[in-house]
Image: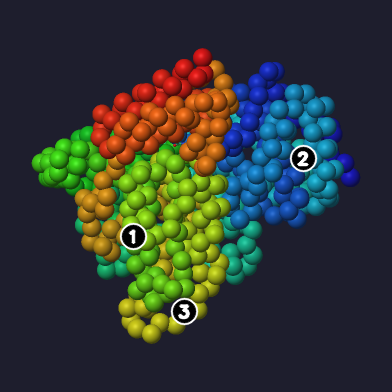
Amino acid sequence: MGIPIDKITEACDRFPKQQGVTFSYGTAGFRTKGATLASTLLRVGMLAVLRSKKLDGRTIGVMITASHNPAEDNGAKLIDPRGEMLDPTWEAYATTVANAETASDLLKALTQLVDSLKIDLTKSSSVICGRDTRPSGNELNDALQMGIKAMGQETVELVDLGVVTTPCVHYAVKSRNLKGEERKAYGEPTLEGYLSKIADAFNQLMTGRQSTSSLVIDCANGVGFSALEILKPMISSSLPIELVGTNIDDPAALNSNCGADYVKTGQRLPPAMTDILKPGQRACSLDGDADRVVFYYLTTGSHNAPEAGGQVQTEGKFRLLDGDKIATLAAGYIGDLVKQAGLGDKLKIGVVQTAYANGSSTAYLRNAGLPVRCVPTGVKHLHHAAERYDIGVYFEANGHGTVLFSPETIDILAQFEPSTPAQDTAAKQLRGLISLINQAVGDAISDFLLVEVILAHKRWGPEEWDAGYEDLPNRLLKVSVADRNAFKTEDAERKLTSPEGMQAELDELTRKFEKGRSFVRPSGTEDCVRVYAEASTEPGAIQLGKAVQDLVERYSS
Ligand SMILES: CC(=O)N[C@H]1[C@@H](OP(=O)(O)O)O[C@H](CO)[C@@H](O)[C@@H]1O
Ligand SMILES: [Mg+2]
């Protein structure tokens, strides 16, 4: 049996590829202007079917989203059977198929793939898809489904979850690939199934630990709002939440002056919070597809500011609690539980970060005796590295992340026989966390609930959490260049290997600043080069960032 030539040709004529546009499956799948992407989604659908057939009919996921990017952008990523990111070898196939110009090029590319991978086309296939609130999502979903049906013919099983968060699709893929009792224990593959699973775990973990005040959540005017409306009544007895950034009917509002990226990059409060957030109250911002979260608060009184020579009296000063702060909070708390359970010698915890992690967070973790690894940007790199630990905590500074418990760790905890009531309590907590935390992929909702559980158990407000360490002042800049691929890196993106000579100059600049650290890398999701700079003082970080930006511009001209 060969590929269905007529159906594929017909579908290709309906969603032709724009001439001259090149697509690339990057850090977060395909991502560009939504209006150019229909042909790509069509091909993603075809590829998802082939991937499923290759894996004996196991379910593959597709999420249509451009996350924190503006409303007119869109994108797509494929999700593998355990809910993880697409196997890297298939990323290259995705790029090839997306760039096939004509129907005959596409047929050739698909046939080659089927032949070289020996895909049995008679096998059944199964695909789950979802999309965020972007206006282009509907048309792209049509193209995707046409691709799925063209390649999968009558035998494909297609489930459209509709408008849902990215982590929900990852979860649903994982659930769908479980059978019988296992699926029942994990949760049903729907948004409601997902939310009730994490709400149950959260309520269990919060027993007797009512939150002191409500949490204000900025939904970035995106799909996180739809999910949180469903979740809100499920958790209201443990945690009252107040939602802002809820305008999902106005496409222009998505990620505009709100959301995790706005807060993290600008280190500022979303304007919609100004009249709502009280000093000392906890707040967090999700991004447009609800797979990342950062916390923040306004100070109530004095806080430690080494750059100003110690304690300074302030009220209402904005303080960010980003992915690094979440990682340190989670790793510290879970580490304590493991020790309390008497499993300190058996279960090793490790933390995975990228070069964007604040230097103070890395130092803090190392001082606490936790192993820390640095890997290249992009969740897939962090995820794989975290899988090597018994309990792997990974977060990007911008708030993407989660905690992974290895299958052996889950078994050890399931069979654990406590010797004391304290050990019993700690082990129960750890088992509860396994249900609360989305281990397929980081999820803003499950992550903020994790933070809330920890704060409630420690009886901490945001200021106590923040007191762990002081972030080094830093800047993250975007530089437009003619060809970002001229910038090549090594050592987990911390050093440039090209353009020649640039790293030596960068080192020399960095040395001039106390605690200076800076690196340059091409973005995998935007057409720019990113510059990161940190130093012991705010003016130092600004000056170093600017100097490195100038260096990038000089080398790219
Ligand atoms: C500095 C930064 O925040 N980079 C982001 C951004 O990647 P870039 O390759 O830097 O464009 O988007 C990725 C996908 O969402 C995310 O994983 C990553 O952390
Ligand atoms: Mg996102």
Label 2 and label 3: CA atoms lie apart by 48 Å
Residue matched to label 2:
151
Residue 431: horizontal and vertical position, in percent?
44, 69
User: Gap between marks 3 and 1, in whole Å?
Assistant: 26 Å
Q: Nearer the viewer, residue 438 or 520?
A: 520
Please name the amino acid that badge 2 sits on.
Met
Q: Residue at x 66, y 30 (%)?
A: 40
Query: At 37% from the left edge and 32% from the top edge, which residue is drawn?
Result: 510
**Precedes in sequence: disc 3 or disc 1:** 1
Q: Kindly identify which numbered label has been placed on residue 368.
A: 1
Residue 330 coordinates in the image, percent (x, y): 37, 57
Task: Report helix, strand or loop for mark 2.
Answer: helix
Relative horizontal placement of residue 505, taking residue 263 as reference (left or right): right
Q: Quadrant of residue 437?
A: bottom left
Identify the element where label 1 is drawn. loop
Quadrant of residue 544 within the rendered picture: top left
Which image quarter holds the N terminus? top right
Say if residue 158 shows up in the picture.
Answer: yes
Give the residue type at disc 1.
Ala
Q: Residue at x 61, y 23 (%)?
A: 36
SS category of the residue bearing label 3: loop
Q: For mark 2, does the 10 Å Cα neighbourhood hold few (<14), some (14 to 19), or many (20 or more) residues?
A: many
Residue 147 image-quadrant placement: top right
Structural distance between the alpha carbons of marks 2 and 1: 53 Å
* Residue at the extreme top of the image, as rendered: 557
| Rendering coords of residue 244 (x, y %) | 31, 39
Residue with the mark numbered 3: 416
Position of residue 183 relative to residue 174, above or below, is below
